[in-house]
Image (tube, rainbow, N blue to C red):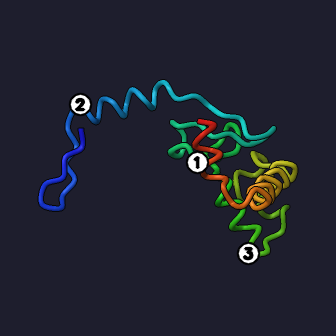
C-alpha cells in the first residue's frame, strides 16, 4: 500500500514485496529481431538483446548525426550491428505512424 502523509510518499513493506513479485512474473517481450523489453533490464525500457544498451540512447546518437559505424563501435564494439540500429529507427518510425502511442503499446505488451 502506498500512503501519502503530508506530501511525502511512504512505501510499505507490502508494497515493496508486491512490486518485487510483479517484476519476477513479468515476461520479456520481443519487439523485433534485435530489440526486447524486459522488466528486469533497464526498468523495462526497450534494449538490444543481450545488452543493457537502450534503444533511446542509440536513437539519440542517430539524432545527433553520428555515423552508424561509429554508433556500433561506441556501444560495445560489435555488440550492436547496423541491422540493429536500422531496426531501432524502424521501431521509432512505426511509433510515429501509430500516432506516437508506442509507450502504451509497450505497456500493453508487457
Element carrying mark 3? loop
Crowd tier of the residue under label 2, counting other residues whose Cα lies within 10 Å: few below 14, some 14–19, many 20 or above: few
Q: Quadrant of residue 41?
A: top right
Does residue 45 appear to the left or right of 48 in the view shown?
left
The location of residue 10, given as percent across then percent down, is: 19, 48
Earlier-in-chain disc, 2 versus 3: 2
Numbered circle sitting on residue 16: none
Q: Is residue 51 visible?
A: yes
The location of residue 44, given as percent across then percent down, is: 55, 43
Element carrying mark 1? loop
Element carrying mark 2? helix
Tell me the residue at 74%/72% (across/down): 63
Does residue 46 appear to the left or right of 25 in the view shown?
right
Earlier-in-chain disc, 3 versus 1: 1
Label 3: which residue? 64
Residue lying at the far front in this picture: please name it.
99
Image: 41 above or below 58: above
CB under 8 Å between discs 2 and 3: no
Marks 2/3: CA distance?
44 Å
Tell me the residue at 85%/61% (across/down): 69
Label 1: which residue? 45
Query: Viewer-nearest of labels 2 and 3?
Result: 2
Label 2: which residue? 14
The location of residue 81, given as percent across then percent down, is: 83, 49
The location of residue 51, given as percent across then percent down, is: 65, 42
Tell me the residue at 13%/54% (across/down): 5
CB under 8 Å between discs 2 and 1: no
Marks 3/1: CA distance?
21 Å
Tell me the quarter of the image containing the N terminus.
Answer: top left
Earlier-in-chain disc, 2 versus 1: 2
Query: Viewer-nearest of labels 3 and 1?
Result: 1
Query: Viewer-nearest of labels 2 and 1?
Result: 2
Amino acid at each position: 500500500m502506498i500512503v501519502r502523509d503530508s506530501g511525502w510518499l511512504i512505501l510499505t513493506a507490502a508494497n515493496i514485496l508486491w512490486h518485487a513479485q510483479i517484476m519476477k512474473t513479468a515476461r520479456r517481450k520481443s519487439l523485433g529481431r534485435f530489440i526486447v523489453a524486459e522488466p528486469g533490464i533497464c526498468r523495462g525500457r526497450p534494449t538490444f538483446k543481450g545488452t543493457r544498451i537502450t534503444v533511446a540512447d542509440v536513437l539519440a546518437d542517430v539524432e545527433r548525426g553520428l555515423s552508424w559505424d561509429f554508433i556500433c563501435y561506441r556501444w560495445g564494439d560489435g555488440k550492436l550491428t547496423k541491422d540493429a540500429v536500422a531496426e531501432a529507427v524502424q521501431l521509432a518510425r512505426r511509433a510515429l505512424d501509430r500516432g506516437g502511442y508506442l509507450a502504451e503499446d509497450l505497456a500493453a505488451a508487457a
